[in-house]
Image (tube, grey):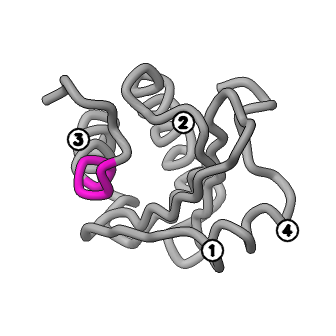
């Protein structure tokens, strides 16, 4: 993921939390907000210290970023997404993270039509 595809500022996170919609499964909560005039999607990640040490948290973030990278063609482009990892995500491998993330994005109906 390129830097311009990341939600970094607290104000941007708060807008997505307050004005956006959210969907969840056991492993992840996904908030999303449509942004007018934005050509590509942006993703913000939140992984709590309760999930483990820095190594574990960074691994979860790497897995989520890679999953989003592989799903980028299916994601709706003019949106901001905030993905929050829950406790079960700490023990998952990459393929489980990707499957779970696909599941919650499918529930949220933010994946384009024509996918699994």
Depth check: give the residue in front, 52 or 99.
99
How far apart are the two marked residues, 3 and 1, measured between alpha carbons?
27 Å
Instruction: Residue lying at the far left in this picture: please name it.
Output: 116
**Circle 2/circle 3 CB separation < 8 Å:** no
Which-is-in-front pick, marks 4 and 3? 4
Depth check: give the residue in front, 98 or 116.
116
For marks 3 and 1 on the same chain, the one whose residue lies earlier in the sequence: 1
**Circle 4/circle 1 CB separation < 8 Å:** no
Which-is-in-front pick, marks 3 and 1? 1
Around disc 1, counting alpha carbons within 10 Å, would you say few (fewer than 14), some (14 to 19), or many (20 or more)? few
In-image side of 2 versus 63 (left or right)? right
Which-is-in-front pick, marks 1 and 2? 1
Q: Which residue is mark 4?
A: 11
- Secondary structure at badge 4 equals helix
- Secondary structure at badge 3 equals helix
- Secondary structure at badge 1 equals helix
Which residue is depicted at the point 47% across and 35% down?
76
How far apart are the two marked residues, 2 and 4, measured between alpha carbons?
21 Å
Q: Which residue is mark 2?
A: 65
Say which quarter of the image contains residue 102: top left
How far apart are the two marked residues, 4 and 3, measured between alpha carbons?
30 Å
Q: Which residue is mark 1?
A: 19
Q: Position of residue 73 (x, y in %)?
A: 43, 20
Which-is-in-front pick, marks 4 and 1? 1
Residue 44 lies, with reference to residue 93, above or below; the image says below
Which residue is depicted at the point 39% across and 27% down?
71
How far apart are the two marked residues, 2 and 3, measured between alpha carbons?
13 Å
Instruction: Residue lying at the far front in this picture: please name it.
Output: 36
Around disc 3, counting alpha carbons within 10 Å, would you say few (fewer than 14), some (14 to 19), or many (20 or more)? few
Segment tinted magenta in the rendering: 104-109
**Marker disc for residue 99:** 3
How far apart are the two marked residues, 4 and 1, measured between alpha carbons?
12 Å
């Amino acid at each position: 993921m390129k830097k311009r595809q990341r939600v970094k500022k607290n104000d941007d996170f708060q807008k997505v939390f307050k004005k956006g919609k959210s969907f969840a499964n056991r492993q992840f909560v996904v908030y999303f907000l449509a942004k007018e005039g934005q050509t590509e999607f942006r993703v913000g990640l939140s992984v709590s210290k309760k999930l483990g040490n820095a190594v574990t948290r960074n691994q979860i973030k790497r897995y989520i970023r890679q999953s989003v990278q592989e799903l980028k063609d299916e994601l709706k482009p003019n949106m901001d997404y905030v993905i929050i990892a829950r406790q079960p995500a700490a023990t998952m491998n990459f393929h489980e993270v990707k499957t779970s993330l696909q599941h919650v994005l499918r529930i949220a109906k933010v994946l384009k039509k024509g996918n699994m």
